[in-house]
């Protein structure tokens, strides 16, 4: 029987290539049951290497990791809303860099 997602971790990204891997790994390394967790990265039209880094980490984890890319920069509020609209969890954790 497949477990339902309980927690959706939503990470907005705009040119955070320097920090995005460490951020994702901090979630992965938590002791929360990976089968009840999803990570949603919403990229807000980054121009750095952050999308490549996300894809590299995605290939190495058993956690459901979804990458959603905006074609144009929409800002933090709309980026978070994109994550929330795509979340399957009962609870949300919203990250913010800066």
Image (tube, rainbow, N blue to C red):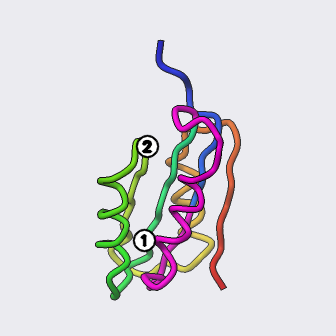
Quarter of the picture containing the C terminus is: bottom right
Identity of the residue drawn at 59% across and 76% down: 76
Dot 1 alpha-carbon crowd within 10 angstroms: few under 14, some 14 to 19, many 20 or more:
many
Which mark, residue 79?
none
Residue 87 x/y as whole percent: 55, 45
Identity of the residue drawn at 52% across and 71% down: 22
Q: Which residue is mark 2?
A: 64
Residue 83 x/y as whole percent: 53, 57
Identity of the residue drawn at 53% across and 52% down: 28
35 drawn magenta? yes
70 drawn magenta? no
Left or right, 26 with respect to 63, comes to: right
49 up-or-down from 39: above or below: below
Residue 11 x/y as whole percent: 56, 64
Dot 2 alpha-carbon crowd within 10 angstroms: few under 14, some 14 to 19, many 20 or more:
some
Left or right, 1 with respect to 53, comes to: right
Magenta residues, start to end: 11-36
Under circle 1, the secondary element is strand
Identity of the residue drawn at 65% across and 67% down: 95
Residue 91 x/y as whole percent: 70, 42
Which mark, residue 43?
1
Left or right, 22 with respect to 65, comes to: right
Q: Residue furthest top?
A: 1
Of label 2 and label 1, which has the lower sequence position? 1
24 up-or-down from 36: above or below: below
Under circle 2, the secondary element is strand
Q: Quadrant of residue 68?
A: bottom left
Give whichever of 65, 45 is nearer the camera. Answer: 65
């Amino acid at each position: 029987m497949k477990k339902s997602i309980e927690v959706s971790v939503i990470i907005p990204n705009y040119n955070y290539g320097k920090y995005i891997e460490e951020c994702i790994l901090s979630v992965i390394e938590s002791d929360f049951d990976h089968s009840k967790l999803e990570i949603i990265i919403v990229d807000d039209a980054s121009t750095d290497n952050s999308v490549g880094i996300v894809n590299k980490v995605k290939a190495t984890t058993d956690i459901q990791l979804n990458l959603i890319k905006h074609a144009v920069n929409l800002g933090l509020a709309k980026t978070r809303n994109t994550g929330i609209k795509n979340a399957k969890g009962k609870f949300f954790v919203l990250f913010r860099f800066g």
